[in-house]
Image: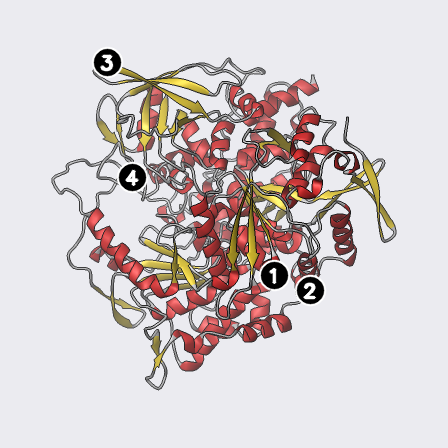
Amino acid sequence: MKYQSFSELKVGDKAYKAISFDSVSNQFALDRLPFCIKILLENLIRHEHEEFVSSEDIEHIARWDTSDSGQHEISFVPARVILQDFTGVPAIVDLAAMRDAVNSLGGDAQSINPLNPVELVIDHSVMVDYFGEEDSLEKNTDVEIERNKERYQFLKWGQSSFDNFKVVPPGRGIVHQVNLEYLARCAFTREDDDGTYVYPDTLVGTDSHTTMINGLGILGWGVGGIEAEAAMLGQPVTMLLPKVVGFRLSGKLSPGVTATDMVLTITEQLRNHGVVGKFVEFYGPGLKHLTTADRATIANMAPEYGATCGIFPVDDVALDYLKLTGRSDEQIALVEAYAKDAGLWHDDNSKDAEYHETLELDLGEVVPSLAGPKRPQDRIALDKAAEAFKEWHRSQIDVEVLDETSDFVAEGGATADVDEDHESFVNFRGERFNLEDGAIVIAAITSCTNTSNPSVLVGAGLVAKKAVELGLASKPWVKTSLAPGSQVVTQYLEDAGLMDPLEELGFNLVGYGCTTCIGNSGPLPDEISDAIRKAKLTVSSVLSGNRNFEGRIHPDVAANYLASPPLVVAYALAGNMNIDITKDPIGKSKDGKPVYLKDIWPTNEEIQSLVKEFVSGDLFKEKYADVFKGNDIWNHLDVSATSVYDWPDSTYIKHPPFFQDMGKSPDPVASIDNARCLVKVGDSITTDHISPAGAIAPESPAGEYLQEQGVDPNDFNSYGSRRGNHEVMMRGTFANVRLQNQLAPGTKGSATTHYPSGDSMSIYHAAMRYKEEGVPAVVVGGKEYGTGSSRDWAAKGPALMGVRAVMAESYERIHRSNLIGMGVLPLQFKAGDSAESLDIRGDESFSIAKIEKGQKEVDVTITSDDGSTKSVTVDIRIDTANEFTYFEHGGILHYVIREYLKKAS
């Protein structure tokens, strides 16, 4: 070892061992390094004794040559892993299956354990079945437990069976907010035989919004469940040394402008610049005007602006937050002392780092905004929102009129047509009204993005209070809900006297967890849903979330807008996106006078006065005192005490087939011969398009399977809740109602054409037919394939369906990694090439030559049914040596199992 050495750090009466940078700083100017890169450097030096770290790696990162266009692979070992239940359940299912595999291959099953601390927060399972009622929380909780009992029993088994694994039971909050408010350490410690070591708190998580923790100066990002499982089992995360974009913030937000407006502006700017695969580091004089909650709001949406992370430094603001959230004095002192000792502290005297690229934003130029109707980067200034909706709606009418002579009908697909009558009168809850295009049918205060920030939640409460005082009410067709990120939120809203007015407008507490933002919006009232479908209305949702992709929020809702919590309340009052709420009245007062947005919008002074009075450290300590303790139902769930899971007859948890017929060594990498195209899509296909999410339709392949198993459609629950059952998940892959498969023109959803027969069928059934015929499958895509959440089933599903390779113009980082983790080959068209320019129709057969380690490109032979062929050279997007190792083993978990067996022999 050339660089690893430790120094002693005294904090109070305790001594810690910390990596010394002296041997590196003697040769390299480390003050040039961005904050995030210093964390990676410390990580490399601390693991220099491992075979995956070399002195060259350390020197390359310490040299920090921003003009170097080369790509250098490094390894990163996170201090911990965090999971949410949707993505966490399949991760623990895989660990349980790995124990079975090790057992069957003659090894010790109990050797499969997380080596790093793993914390799972159950937050994705609550649905908004009940809303606008005093007992909505209790009813939704009862339904949640009943629906998910089998999953929860499995997680309790995992908690008792695996070392280093803790579960935060349901009803405690959103994983990212619990992480920020309680689980985060900032300075991580590890006891060893020769003392206590301290180093940066770092993590990876199975939710793309893991980046929210970057707001507290902690480096972490979202990975697929497959990558997370490997990290849990001691494998490093391999990555190319990222480019770092410096984002300089100056000035401060104007009165009436929220942190949400700011993050939507930043998201738009960074998406336009292009930061996919890069780190973004925020710096500049504007930092001191942003609370940690504001910073976390920005960091949370790193996936939306495309970056791997969006990090802020450790400074006095971070320490203030640790104090606010009830961290111990000893921990706060350690964080400050370590950050200063390691050169990770930021203050007014800190020198600006050197970045590959820089951007700047004067916070004073941010204006009230929302984003939509289907992408978070599509920011619209609030005063332009009504006109923008009208223009978008007109464009949708133009593109949705299809050729009525088309006779293509596919199982699971739906043709689009337009009814001339776009009006429908509805009788609902004693009222009769006309539901129109643009109607806002969902207004949800939800998601970690905003509910970690007391300013916008108190602001929403004040908007509600002023509205109620004037006699306003939410429109009767709006499904309203409040799903905060932690129990702290409702407590300070109650203490400040703001819960009552929120409830009076229908924003009753529906649960603590991710709801509308992940598609758990629950059903619309039958009367509303029937009217939308009967008149073919284009209706809207407004939510304080971070995702609004097509088909995500609700299948009946075409236009979805991200907005701050105060604006969510305001739009519930207005009731329609055609209303310009900056100019038009949003309602009438009890004395019949028009009420405008300015009449109910609170001042910054009003908001901050309540935040200062009612948000305190004692409140956080109280609510997190028993965070790992569940309610009576959770605590009385029966679980087995076996180390190898006794797989029950369940439609939620099923033994996955990933390790079936697995040998102790991998088969050689082979060519892919005469594959057929299963799906051909355009640009910006998200993991929401690919991975099963949201409701399960009774007529879908997954719905049919569940009914065959005796499950009533009322008990289907969501795809997310059934991620532990591969039979459900592979049937729901590529089944999003907004997916447009070019092999099934005129349809949306799970529809394709089987070749060479030309038969129309669902994508799942075509995949099974190809498997029966012994024909491998490929997917052809456009730019930004796999954008969005870190959904491991977006890779697992296609792999189980027989997809051997994907060819696209570009990939989102997490999805590309997940494909490799499942043994699926990611190929990228050369710059300037595309399926269209190469005249790839999708009805041809595809042969891909065998690839070898280090190979950067490969020839694909495309054969038409008339026998004519053409050869296309594409890039192999296996970027690192470790990735190739995982690929040749058939997946990362197969590699880990074989390594365990090798070490044990």
Kindly identify the amino acid type of the residue bearing the numbered disc 4. Gln
Question: In the image, what residue occupies the spot 51% across and 68% down?
Answer: 254
- Image height check: is 824 above or below 715? above
- Where does label 1 land, which residue? 291
Kindly identify the amino acid type of the residue bearing the numbered disc 2. Gly
Task: Count residues near mark 4 (Cα–Cα under 10 Å), then give few for <14, some for 14-19, many for 20+.
Answer: many
- Where does label 3 land, which residue? 867
Task: Count residues near mark 2 (Cα–Cα under 10 Å), then give few for <14, some for 14-19, many for 20+.
Answer: some
- Where does label 2 land, which residue? 617
Spatial CA span between label 4 and label 3:
28 Å
Q: Nearer the viewer, mark 2 or mark 3?
A: 3
Q: Is 168 positioned to the left or the right of 556 in the image?
A: right
Q: Is 573 positioned to the left or the right of 752 in the image?
A: right
Residue farthest to the bottom, as pictured: 591
Spatial CA span between label 2 and label 1:
15 Å
Question: In the image, what residue occupies the spot 67% across and 56% down?
Answer: 318
The quarter of the rendered structure image containing the C terminus is: top right
**Counting residues from the N terminus, which is met first, the one under dot 2 or under dot 3?**
2
Q: Nearer the viewer, residue 501 or 198?
A: 198
